[in-house]
Image (cartoon, rainbow, N blue to C red):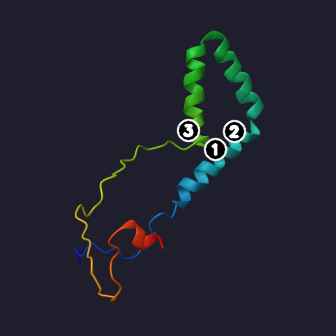
Amino acid sequence: MVNNTGIKYGGRQKGTPNKSTARLIEAFTELLEDNMGKVQELFDKVAEKNPQKALELLLKLSEFAIPKLRAIEVNNEPEDKHTSLNINIIDTGVPFASCEADVVD
């Protein structure tokens, strides 16, 4: 039976990481940590012969440590462009000041 309601039933909740992917990332991170000295030696050899290639490698490896940023659109326009203001005048029985001298007494 096909679900045409648009409501998700079963499966992972939104935002829950995939277990296989999490294990793969953990294993790769452990591999890099255990071989940091070798990675540094290899990086230094590449940098001596081809600095541009070394920078490319550094950028590719940085994606594992620093997540990529996505551009987001900021909308500064208010959703409701029309604002209403209601003013109610209530008679308090106090007369208005007719000049500055009436206010400053």
Residue that appears at 50% across and 42% down: 68
Residue that appears at 33% across and 77% down: 96
Give me the C-alpha separation between circle 1 and circle 3: 13 Å
Between residue 39 and residue 70, name the one nearer to us.
Answer: 70
Residue that appears at 36% across and 47% down: 73
Looking at the picture, how far across and down is residue 72, in whole percent? 39, 47
Give the vertical position of 89 relative to 48 (above or below).
below
- Mark 1 residue type: Phe
Between residue 17 and residue 99, name the one nearer to us.
Answer: 99
Give the vertical position of 85 relative to 22 (above or below).
below
Residue that appears at 70% across and 29% down: 39
Write down the residue under mark 2.
Answer: 32
| SS label for mark 1 | helix
Label pair 2/1, CB-CB below 8 angstroms: yes
Q: Residue 88 sits in which quadrant? A: bottom left
How many labels, in total? Answer: 3
Give the vertical position of 40 relative to 83 (above or below).
above
Between residue 17 and residue 103, name the one nearer to us.
Answer: 103
Q: Residue furthest top?
A: 49
Other residues around mark 3 within 10 Å, as few (<14) / some (14–19) / many (≥20): few
Image mark for residue 63: 3
Looking at the picture, how far across and down is residue 57, in whole percent? 58, 26
Image mark for residue 28: 1
Q: Nearer the viewer, mark 2 or mark 3?
A: 3
Q: Is residue 24 left or right of residue 72?
A: right
- Mark 3 residue type: Glu
| Disc on the earlier residue, 1 or 3 | 1
Q: Is residue 97 left or right of residue 47?
A: left
Give me the C-alpha separation between circle 2 and circle 1: 6 Å
